[in-house]
Image: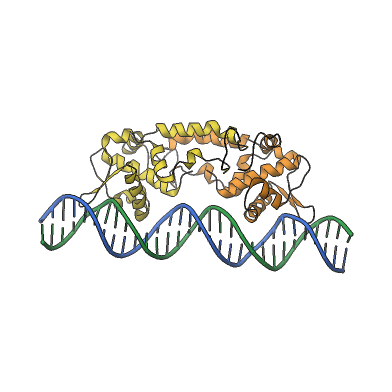
Chain colours: A orange, B yellow, C green, D blue
Amino acid sequence: MFSKACEYGIRATIYIASQSRKERRVGIKEIAAFIDSPAPFTAKILQQLVKNRIIDSVKGPNGGFEIPKDRIFQICITDIVRAIDGNEIFSSCVLGLDNCSEAMPCPVHAEFRSIRAELKSLMDNTCVATLSEDLVKGKSFLKV
Amino acid sequence: MFSKACEYGIRATIYIASQSRKERRVGIKEIAAFIDSPAPFTAKILQQLVKNRIIDSVKGPNGGFEIPKDRIFQICITDIVRAIDGNEIFSSCVLGLDNCSEAMPCPVHAEFRSIRAELKSLMDNTCVATLSEDLVKGKSFLKV
DNA sequence: AATAAAAAGGATAAAAAGGTCTAAAAATCT
DNA sequence: AGATTTTTAGACCTTTTTATCCTTTTTATT
């Protein structure tokens, strides 16, 4: 469904959010260890998230990544996916046709219409605040 | 969502089914031209589908690929996807965790539970007969 | 029997995704 | 100011996916 990069990106964002709730900035090594991902690769992905204004970074001693507290309520899964995998997952044809549309639909176009809308809606309405809250409470996990 | 191989596999199966309805066997070149896919690569994918008893092949002059008429009602999208991409799409964690489960869920596990079930149900209940019928009637398309 | 037509199989190549490494830049602390 | 810590940036490597090509096998037709 998502690329590896996107999976790591979502997991990292949720972890950073969980720590930002406690006013803690976290470094790349800590993030990679907590979400069980390759550190250098994860660093690359976080750079993309910084450029897309999803997370903030601070260099130097006591630096790291963080998310302003109010912003964790605004960031939804869609934002992270768009920043890393782009818009294709929402817009492209299930069977890979270049110009699939209501006027010239692929054979499964109608069948997938509503489920794709549901998926989009789900991702639009699931914010990082909720996801990180569950993590903090020990109700969800980011590795194993 | 699906690999390129799987997209071609589904498109090819629908086209073969549409011709099998008319008792026509079709060769790889015709299939690739109709669904606008690379012929040698598509041939490889069809081999997998033959091994998985989704389609039949006949060698020699007037040979090609076909699907017994009654079988087009039994083949669903799930069958094709399983034969090519395997079961991961149905079973693996959205965020890539190895042991994501109800007991140790990833942060989006609950959110995606019902939509994944819907997706599975949709794919289980969409058969090649319906899809090829729409194609024959000119209501759906397999290229451009 | 010879020929031609078609899929099957295997080796190879190109492109994309996934992942690593090192040097540079920025910020803090002493 | 200098040393240290941390992100940033870019080049590089590896694996997987996508795609091609050539030979072999099978079958039908003449």
Residue shown at 57% from the left, 35% from the top: B101
Residue shown at 44% from the left, 32% from the top: B122
Quadrant hosting residue A76: top right
Residue A52 placement (x, y as % from top left): 66, 49
B71 or A123, which lies in front? Answer: B71
A80 or C20, which lies in front? Answer: C20
Looking at the image, residue A34 lies above or below residue B69: below
Whether residue A52 sits left or right of residue A94 in the image: it is right
Whether residue A61 sits left or right of residue B29 in the image: it is right
Whether residue B135 sits left or right of residue C6 in the image: it is right
Residue shown at 36% from the left, 34% from the top: B127
B50 or B12, which lies in front? Answer: B50
Residue A66 placement (x, y as % from top left): 74, 46
Looking at the image, residue A143 lies above or below residue C17: above
Residue D24 placement (x, y as % from top left): 26, 60
| Residue A19 makes an appearance in the image | yes
Whether residue C21 sits left or right of residue D26 in the image: it is right
Residue A102 placement (x, y as % from top left): 44, 38
Quadrant hosting residue B67: top left
| Residue B144 makes an appearance in the image | no
